[in-house]
Image (cartoon, rainbow, N blue to C red):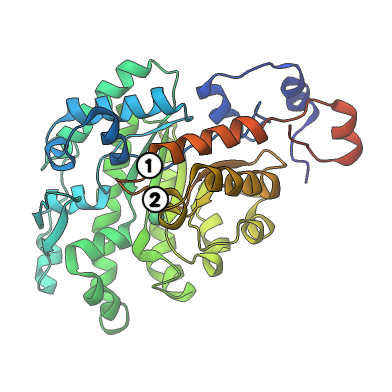
Amino acid sequence: MLRFDLASLEEGITMKQLSTYQRVMHVMEGKLPDRIPVIPQITYTTAQLTGVGLVEALHSPEKTSEALLAGQRELGYDAIYVGWESSFNLLAEAMGCTMRFPEDSVPQVVDHVIKTPNDVEALEIPDPMKAGRLPLHMEMLKRIKSEVKGKVPLFAYTPGPFTLAGQLFGINKLMAATIQDPQLVRALVDKTTITSTLYARANVREGVDVVVTADPTASGSLISPKTFETFVAPHLKHIIMAVSKVGAIPSLHICGKTTPLLKLMANTGARALELDHLVDLQEAKTQVGDRVLIMGNLDPTNLLLNGTPAQVEQAARILIETVGSDGRYILSSGCEIPPNAPLENIQAMVTAAEKYGKFLLDFILVLSNSTFKFI
Ligand SMILES: [Zn+2]
């Protein structure tokens, strides 16, 4: 399907190579890029380049920013995800949850702050510039922003309200309460929506270009479309609208099997959907590709952690050729890339985008076939 007007087509045809920032913004704005952007969901995997320990880095904006910058500089992908651990963990801690810091992994919530319904009312909204370790995140963002000087787009996660509610209350209790005590869930999710919105806005103020609301607990693998409509969608819309209002691009990340939720996800107003490897991207494209940009979805574990560069390149090529032909696609992983994934596999994603994701600048072919071809 051809979605570009003639003016943007001509621009696409006459342009040579776009800068990294231009390439991503072209796609986000519905214009034809010079090639498919490649943005792996990579954060702590970049520790391999600087040798910093995962836990050591948690308290050092200097070390996390160094690693994240090195990842983009050395592997050549098209944006930086500014983050080192889940935003919902960071905010859960800032709201009073107790965390465990394992030596070889990311922190986990071990004690939920909501134990009785009264605790919801007493829950305080954290100041994104002051509470818990949030200032460390903001400092990391400032450092990265000042280094990239507007040449590389910055993405940052903000927690989906349903997922943050699960961190504060416990996921099993939250799921049960959607049936047994919907009032409680509403009150809790209202608070987590405000929290996530303030955090998202603070990220934009400090220079983030794309705010990705991450709501893994709202996965189609865990909840029904009806629960999604009741407890998730209105709150996602609120955050997404707030992100748009302050001039940033809203994106939405939900893990697992989200095929039954795709239309509801597109209805939130997100400009892009980050889809997991369990979703058939061609099916997603058919359902919602005329409304949102699709990002995804190489298997983070079976392929990016355990596969070979040749396998990654081949899988990326298939994605580019099957869902990228209208230019409304970003090659990415299905979810966060594991810390020990070989960097050669990330490099293979970039190679695939450069080899197979360039648009053939043939005006006649474009107009006669109403489609784009790749070189
Ligand atoms: Zn995910």
Query: What residue appears at the point 52 percent right and 33 percent down from the top-left corner?
Result: 350
Say which mark, if any, is on residue 127: none
Q: Above or below — where is 18 with respect to 129?
A: above
Q: Residue 153: x percent and y percent?
A: 44, 27
Q: Residue 109: x percent and y percent?
A: 15, 59
Q: Is mark 2 within 8 Å of ligand 1?
A: no
Q: Residue 42: x percent and y percent?
A: 37, 40
**Other residues around mark 1 within 10 Å, as few (<14) / some (14–19) / many (≥20):** some
Q: Residue 18: x percent and y percent?
A: 60, 19
Q: Is mark 1 within 8 Å of ligand 1?
A: no
Query: What's the distance in space between the residues labelled 1 and 2, CA to CA?
Result: 6 Å
Decide which of 106, 291 is in the foreground and name it. 106
Q: Disc 1, disc 2: CB below 8 Å?
A: yes
Kind of residue sitting beneath label 2: Leu
Residue 28 visible in the displayed image: no
Residue 152 placement: quadrant: top left
Kind of residue sitting beneath label 1: Pro
User: Secondary structure beneath disc 1?
Assistant: loop
Q: Which residue is mark 2?
A: 305
**Other residues around mark 2 within 10 Å, as few (<14) / some (14–19) / many (≥20):** some
Say which mark, if any, is on residue 342: 1
User: Secondary structure beneath disc 2?
Assistant: helix
Decide which of 325, 232 is in the foreground and name it. 325
**Quadrant of the rendered image holding ligand 1:** bottom left
Decide which of 268, 6 is in the foreground and name it. 6
Query: What residue appears at the point 43 percent right and 37 percent down from the top-left corner?
Result: 344
- N-terminal of the pair, mark 1 or mark 2, is 2
Q: Above or below — where is 240 with respect to 115?
A: above
